[in-house]
Image: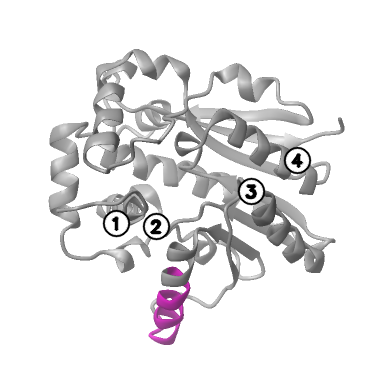
Amino acid sequence: MEIFVHDTAFMIAYYRAQHEVLSRDPFAKLWLRPGLERWANEFAEAVSEHDEILHSLRNRFFHDALDDLITGHESTLFINLGAGFSMYPYVLPEEVVTIEVDFEEIISYKKHKLVSFENQQKIPMRKVIHQQADITTLEGQLAIQNLLKEFQGHRKVILIEGVFFFLSEAQIASTISFCKQIMNEGDHLLCVSFDDSVKQTDVFERLTCYFSEVLKSEHNPHTTLPHRHYKTLSGFELVNQSSGLELGRMLEVLPNSFSEEEILNEYYYVLKRKPD
């Protein structure tokens, strides 16, 4: 079964659908298609059997974080950079406006399917604006900025999930700088990445080999970031930090005996825009 990097969006949805209560995504199952179970089993055997739970935990963390940051606040704009097939808008309050940004093939397919889901009443009606853009380019950033002119009075919550692993450090810096530029004091930025320590683990080596050999993604930089990267970002305050392992232990879906070296443990960060 040939898999391309953008097809991993289907796999992440598959993972969430297998643990609907844990992930808090009742709509992930809408993205299921033949072959995904076999792909998941192959990945589990070649890389890690725990990724299914960990990706569900990641969705759970950001679902809960968004719920805390958005519920009860008026005029909130949720911006999801690299949205994939995530379904956050459909579990958020209906008054929230969402801008989802991703590559053309993802946005075109997702937008078409969402119309179908709405017509079949499989998802609630929400105001979601879809923008095809590469967030690492000036052209893509300008396209997003143009959309924001309509929402100048809105507080912003920006999510960048499952993206930094595929970007160079320079591209990450450019993306965060862009977010800083469009944010006002008190707005929030949510990010996820691997800590540098994961590079020393066998499971990370298996992951990078899998991306290179199976997904044919030889140019993926496999970027990791140290915790200090988020603690020292100019213009931001780190207000919350967790990880898949920490959350999994708290929710009792991962045993306390688990070592971080055994799993692909991603870290989650919630940052608040502050004055420079």
Q: Which residue is mark 3?
A: 137
**Residue density around tag 2, few if under 14, some if 14–19, many if 20 or more, within 10 Å:** many
Badge 2 vs badge 4, beta-carbon distance below 8 Å: no
Tell me where the magenta segment starts and ends, as one range. Answer: 110-121
Q: Tag 3: residue type?
A: Thr
Q: Which residue is mark 1?
A: 17
Instruction: Tell me residue 168's x, y (percent).
Output: 53, 32
Mark 2 secondary-structure assignment = loop
Nearest to N terminus: mark 2 or mark 4 = 2
Residue drawn 57% across and 73% down? 126
Position of residue 56 measured from the top left corner of the image (x, y, whole percent): 35, 45
- Of the residues shown, which amino acid type is indicated by label 4? Lys
Mark before the other along the chain sequence, 1 or 4: 1
Measured in 3D between alpha carbons, the distance from the residue under mark 4 to the one under mark 3, in whole angstroms, is 15 Å
Viewer-nearest of discs 3 and 1: 3
Q: Mark 4 and mark 3 in contact? Answer it, CB < 8 Å.
A: no
Residue placed under numbered mark 2 in the picture: 25
